[in-house]
Image (cartoon, rainbow, N blue to C red):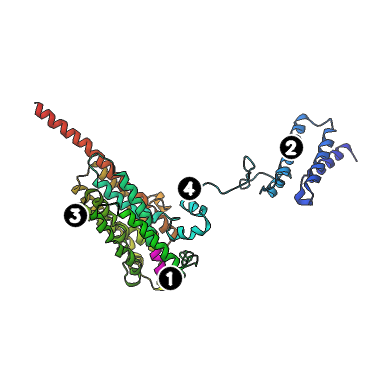
Amino acid sequence: MTPNSQVRKRKGSAHTAAQPGRLGLHPAGTTAHACRGMTSIRARPGLTSAMLGSRAAGFARGLQAVALAWLPGWRGRSFALARAAGAPHSGDLQPPACPEPRGRQLSLSATAVVDSAPRPLQPYLRLMRLDKPIGTWLLYLPCTWSIGLAAEPGCFPDWYMLSLFGTGAILMRGAGCTINDMWDQDYDKKVTRTANRPIAAGDISTFQSFVFLGGQLTLALGVLLCLNYYSIALGAGSLLLVITYPLMKRITYWPQLALGLTFNWGALLGWSAIKGSCDPSVCLPLYFSGVMWTLIYDTIYAHQDKRDDVLIGLKSTALRFGENTKPWLSGFSVAMLGALSLVGVNSGQTAPYYAALGAVGAHLTHQNQKGIHGGSPEIYTLDIHRPEDCWNKFISNRTLGLIVFLGIVLGNLWKEKKTDKTKKSIGNKIEN
């Protein structure tokens, strides 16, 4: 055997000994073989210093990986052993920078928060839809519009009222979902998308959900009692809508209209909470615009379940409009923008508000590449036959609602500038 073949053989021995996964060797045996391989390499004076440095670094990494693999509680044993064997790096198998015990990754998403809650509590949080906050946003945003419009010229909206209505939106949306799931538990079991809801899946009994509903309504009543008497009476009047809405899909093709009447009650309540009563010239067109908005986004939402709805006998505007959905949604969009324009005129809004309405119109109708991928709810890019596209268009309505709110706030702040200019001009005239 030639000297070169001996070197190759010793290299092969060292490489094979570093693969315990293939030979079933104990880590101690692996280390011993690696040491013998390293000794034989050092015995060859003909090897360059660069090769020695590379082998030494590989040997050190192997020892570290083997040691870490057998530390108590360390979960990456197989990965560490693969690294000891010189396994290639992979984008899917990147080890942590510091080999520490792995826990749950920190995330502030609603789903992650619910999943990190104590296990007995999780079904109740899902029953409230805390893992899907888009519904809470759509309930809350009309309240913010009304509170913003009721603010004094040049002032920001009342932050206390915004936080109070935010709390109420979480509780009332949770109560509404609980009532809906109690009514629909037999239907939910037959629909793939809703079969895992807590009541339908048997995670919560009907009695438990009823007790939980009582708790939510009690807390919501506590929020309502923080308002003036007019608003308390007005808020209590919405309870009938909250209870009866889930039944509408059984008797009419317009349950989305009933949802609109329910979800936009805050457009009336927010103004009265600030002013003490409703101004019909502002509150009614604002309420109407919210109802039109709900008809837009909930019709899109209903297209996800239209096949199941036909099978189990439920009704929706998605089934009522069918292939004519886009013309109907276009009509609702025009009505929404017209009502919001009337709100602006009657409340003395300024340029930023109307600029926001222009952005809302573009958001609803503009066709571009982003819309095709579900980035915004453009009606003409909506594919009513793709549930995932319907969902993307639906959830992007939060952005639309925030644009309106931002326009109201900036428009109200602009009033102060306009008022200051008017005061200065009047003062100049008096001086002259």
User: In terms of secondary structure, where does tag 1 sit?
Assistant: helix
Residue drawn at x 25%, y 58% is 233
Q: Is residue 324 magenta?
A: no
Task: Tell me the residue at 53%/57% (across/down).
Answer: 119
C-alpha separation, residue under disc 4 versus residue under disc 3? 40 Å
Earlier in the chain: of badge 1 and badge 2, it is: 2
Secondary structure character of the magenta stretch overall: helix
The image shows residue 335 at horizontal and vertical percentages of: 25, 56
The three-letter amino acid code for the residue at tag 4 is Leu
Which is nearer the eye, 62 or 364?
62
Please report the residue visible at 42 percent of the width from the left and 62 percent of the height from the top. 212
Q: Which amino acid does label 1 sit on?
A: Tyr
The residue that disc 4 covers is 108
Question: Which of disc 3 and disc 4 is earlier in sequence?
Answer: 4
Question: Mark 2 is on which residue type?
Answer: Ala
Answer few, some or many: residues within 10 Å of disc 1's Cα (few below 14, many 20 plus, some between 14 and 19).
some
Q: What residue type is labelled 3?
A: Pro
- The relative height of residue 5 versus residue 118 in the rendered view (above or below) is above
Give the CA separation, mark 3 to mark 1: 40 Å
Q: Considering the numbered disc 4 on the image, is that residue within a helix, a strand or a loop?
A: loop
Q: Report which residue position mark 1 lands on.
A: 187
Place of residue 428 in the rendered image (x, y in percent of width and height, measured from the top left): 12, 28
For marks 3 and 1 on the same chain, the one whose residue lies earlier in the sequence: 1
Mark 2 and mark 3 in contact (Cβ < 8 Å)? no
Mark whose residue sits in front, 3 or 2 = 3
Q: Is residue 160 left or right of residue 34?
A: left
Q: How far apart, in angstroms, are the residues tagged by discs 4 and 1?
A: 32 Å
**Span colored in magenta:** 178-187
Residue under pointer 3 = 280
> Going from the N terminus, do you reach mark 3 or mark 2 first?
2
Q: Name the residue under label 2.
A: 60
Residue that extends furthest to the right in the rendered view of this protein: 1
